[in-house]
Amino acid sequence: MDTDSQNAGTDAPVAVLLDVDGTLVDSNYLHVEAWTRALQDVGRDVAAWRVHRAIGMGSSELLEAVLGDDADAVAEQVKDAHSHYYAGAAGRLRAVDGARDLVRTLAARGIRPVLATSAAPDELERLRDVLDVEQELHAVTGAGDVDAAKPAPDLVQVALEAADVPAGRAVLVGDTVWDVEAAGRAGVACVAVRSGGIGVDELREAGAVAVYDDVADLLAHLDESPLVRLGG
């Protein structure tokens, strides 16, 4: 019997791995604005929609996606400028409707909520302040804990370790195809939300097992969702 089967009893711990940007915090479009301004600073005029398509990746992966072979030449300068512009917009960060209630409800039901985000350490600190659910979180993982960010599976694997559950006892909630792909590569089911600006069909085609408008919609249907069925 494999490890996942041995740990699949109804008394085994269950975890929900939660992306943050675009999923729990309404930040994706602030990132788009910061990245496009940063790219303009170095003479790279990239359409905002192209940047949006790459949101959810790590910063290095995002720049490679929008600049190709030109990324290395300007990467550090663009990353620094993005951090500057994004920090300037921090006062506009807001928790997505239902985000705090979802985390608190999961914790109250004995499900382990774990943040699993590609955000850099300084950005993650701001996001945690906005969320204000520290007491309910089982663990927090971010880009500083891995060498390769989403869509690589590393962050999901680290989050599983922090939750102390096998892949079969976890679900990731995310808002981009990169979340879905990272979860799939780690053997974890992914529930997607549309609050990051990605359409239902694309999220499903990437492998999402269910799609909700946002985490408030997910919370409203929690008892029928894959998050709760996992613990049955």
Image (cartoon, rainbow, N blue to C red):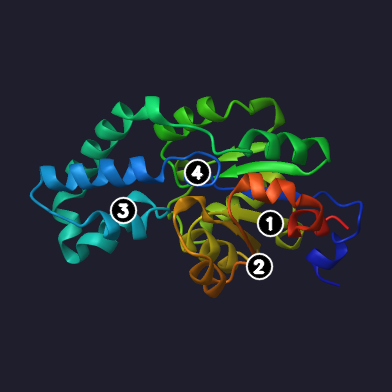
The location of residue 109, given as percent across then percent down, is: 83, 40
Helix, strand or loop under label 2: loop
For the N terminus, the quadrant is bottom right
Residue at horizontal 45%, vertical 28%?
A: 126
Helix, strand or loop under label 3: helix
Name the residue tied to disc 1. Answer: 171
Q: Cα distance, mark 1 to mark 2?
A: 10 Å
Counting residues from the N terminus, which is met first, the one under dot 4 or under dot 3?
Answer: 3
Counting residues from the N terminus, which is met first, the one under dot 4 or under dot 1?
Answer: 4
Name the residue tied to disc 3. Answer: 60
Question: Contact (CB < 8 A) between labels 4 and 1?
Answer: no
Residue 209's disc is 2
Specify the amino acid type for callout 3.
Ser
Residue at horizontal 19%, vertical 42%?
A: 37
Specify the amino acid type for callout 2.
Val
Please give left or right for residue 95 compared with residue 31 in the image.
right
